[in-house]
Amino acid sequence: MATCPDGHESAATDYCDICGKRMGSLSSSAAGSTPAGGSAPAAPAHAGTETAGPSGRAHETCSNCGAERTGQFCEACGLDFSSGAVPPARQAASITSLSPDQAKPESQSPPPVPAQAEPQSQSSSPAAAQAEQPSQSSTPAAAQAEQPPQPSPPVAAQTWTAVATADRNYFDQVVGHGGPDAGTIEFPAYCPERRFRLIGPQMRIGRRSTSRGIEPEIDLTGPPADTGVSHMHAVLIAEPDGTWALVDPGSANGTQLNGAEIATGVKVPLHDGDRISLGGWTVLTIQAG
């Protein structure tokens, strides 16, 4: 192995693996000797300053940042001791690696940049400086448009109710028409109000029949019993939008909505306050909400 001028054994023959000095024509037997010309080999340009270490052997420091030299390149700032060049990517880092006694307050000018670094061009035009900044919208409408749309809160479903009562005016109308059963129908002396909450896909209106297996959700069996109401008289159907509709599947005495008879098998939409008249005296008042 070759020996450098400082006595380090190096596998490389051009620069020392330990201190980075040029090996020249020195060999391990002539380490530290003077060449035939009588003068010592010149140190490479920008090599730095030599100081005596604790062992008495000369140690070299970086001329750019003052760090101790340990190889061909400075460990702190990347200075190439053979050429004196500092890699541009390490120049900014070398400024921040100053020792505490070399650091300057923020109010003073920053440390000088080495001559090898090319200063970055800066535009002196205010318009150009503004163009370099990312564009940001200053209007509230634009800022709101950039936000993702928020889902609408769910709409609370309305509670629909059918209130069954005995209506004297409707009874008088039925008797006045003189139907086949008009003489046998009597208006009840007492009929409590009955309330039916509309739930599920449909609500059947009629009178319960055990023998026929008919169990309507709105059971008007009584007492008192309105014999004019068919066992399967009408049906309330739930709509997709939360409303309800009325259908008469073919009752014997027909069904009226707000005083007008509806056609058989035709679905009629319902609204809050609608009155469904059926049988001899029964009226269902629809309440929504």
Image (spheres, grey):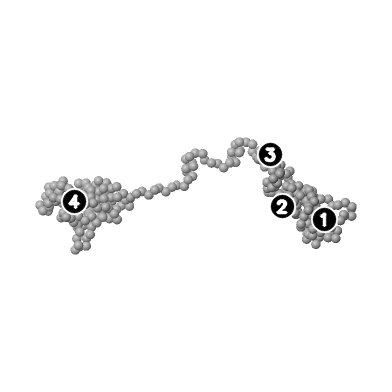
Mark 2 surroundings within 10 Å by alpha-carbon count, few (fewer than 14), some (14 through 19), many (20 or more): some
Front residue of this view, candidates 257 and 114 = 114
What secondary structure is marked by label 4?
A: loop
Q: CA distance from mark 1 to mark 2?
A: 21 Å
Is residue 35 shown left or right of residue 48? right
Tell me the number on the disc at residue 5: 1
Q: Secondary structure at mark 3?
A: loop
What numbered label is drawn on residue 75? 2
Cα separation, mark 2 vs mark 3, equals: 26 Å
Tell me the amino acid under the disc marked 4. Pro
Q: Pointer 3: what residue?
A: 109
Count neighbours of disc 4 (C-alpha within 10 A) and say few if under 14, some if 14 to 19, many if 20 or more.
few
Q: In front: 150, or 190?
A: 190
For label 4, the residue is 192
Residue lying at the far front in this picture: please name it. Answer: 54
In the rendered image, the quadrant that contains the N terminus is: bottom right
Residue 79 on image: x %, y % = 73, 49
The tag earlier along the polypeptide, 2 or 4, is 2
